[in-house]
């Protein structure tokens, strides 16, 4: 079954741009180490053709930028930018891996509500959505009412559980 969480604390996205960011060996470690030394939690990482974005608690964003600036200045990265005031909503569950079109099913009601998705990061069992803070709660409420019932997840999950129980528990 899908689990949806809305994180109440504001998040900051720190973008580190460089022409060859995807082709730089150990680039993630290079920028994660100064944050680790300063005990700054990274909530998510997003990479693109020319940038790396590290999502941190907004309260620690200034400290994070200072730690990252030195590392960036010693490399081929041109600039660091910060976007503050982001909200984070996670959708997680094993259904994400084996449900074709699930991202579309999640984003359609958000688009209809005219809510802008600032960034999306994914893993096998979770999708992390970033919105402007004021839109984060709106998106969460839409999904809270929309997922999983309208996606058929409860029925599919219930059927899988029943099949698994039948295999595990012998008939009496």
Image: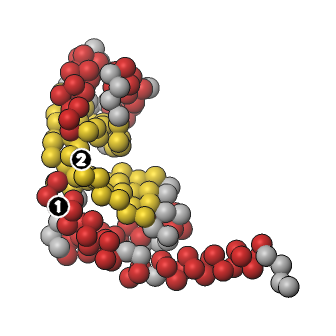
Residue 146, quarter of the rendered image: bottom left
Q: In this view, does 115 lie above or below 167?
A: above
Residue furthest to the front = 172
Question: How crowded is the residue under tag 1: few (<14 C-alpha within 10 Å), some, or many (20+)?
Answer: some
Q: How is the image coloured?
A: secondary structure
Percent position of residue 86, x then y: 19, 49
Q: In this view, does 126 lie above or below 34?
A: below
Q: Is residue 53 visible?
A: no
Task: Select label 2 or label 1 by which is in front.
Answer: 2
Percent position of residue 154, x then y: 49, 79
Residue 128, quarter of the rendered image: bottom left
Q: In the drawing, what numbered circle is on residue 9?
A: 2
Residue depicted at x 35% and y 42%:
43
Residue 5, quarter of the rendered image: bottom left
Label 2 element class: strand
Q: Alpha carbon of mark 2 to alpha carbon of mark 1: how far?
A: 13 Å
Q: In the drawing, what numbered circle is on residue 135?
A: 1
Label 1 element class: helix
Residue depicted at x 14% and y 58%:
134
Q: In this view, does 171 lie to the left or right of 51?
A: right
């Amino acid at each position: 079954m899908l689990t949806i969480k809305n994180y109440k604390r504001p998040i900051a996205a720190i973008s580190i741009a460089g022409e060859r960011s995807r082709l730089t060996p150990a680039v993630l470690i290079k920028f994660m180490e100064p944050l680790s030394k300063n005990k700054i939690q990274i909530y998510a990482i997003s990479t693109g053709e020319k940038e790396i974005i590290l999502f941190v608690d907004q309260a620690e964003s200034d400290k994070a930028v200072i730690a990252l600036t030195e590392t960036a200045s010693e490399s081929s990265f041109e600039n660091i930018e910060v976007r503050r005031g982001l909200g984070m909503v996670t959708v997680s569950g094993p259904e994400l891996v084996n449900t074709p079109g699930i991202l579309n099913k999640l984003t359609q009601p958000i688009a209809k509500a005219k809510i802008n998705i600032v960034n999306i990061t994914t893993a096998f069992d979770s999708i992390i959505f970033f919105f402007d803070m004021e839109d984060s709660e709106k998106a969460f409420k839409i999904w809270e009412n929309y997922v999983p019932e309208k996606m058929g997840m409860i029925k599919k999950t219930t059927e899988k559980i029943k099949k698994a129980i039948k295999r595990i528990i012998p008939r009496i």
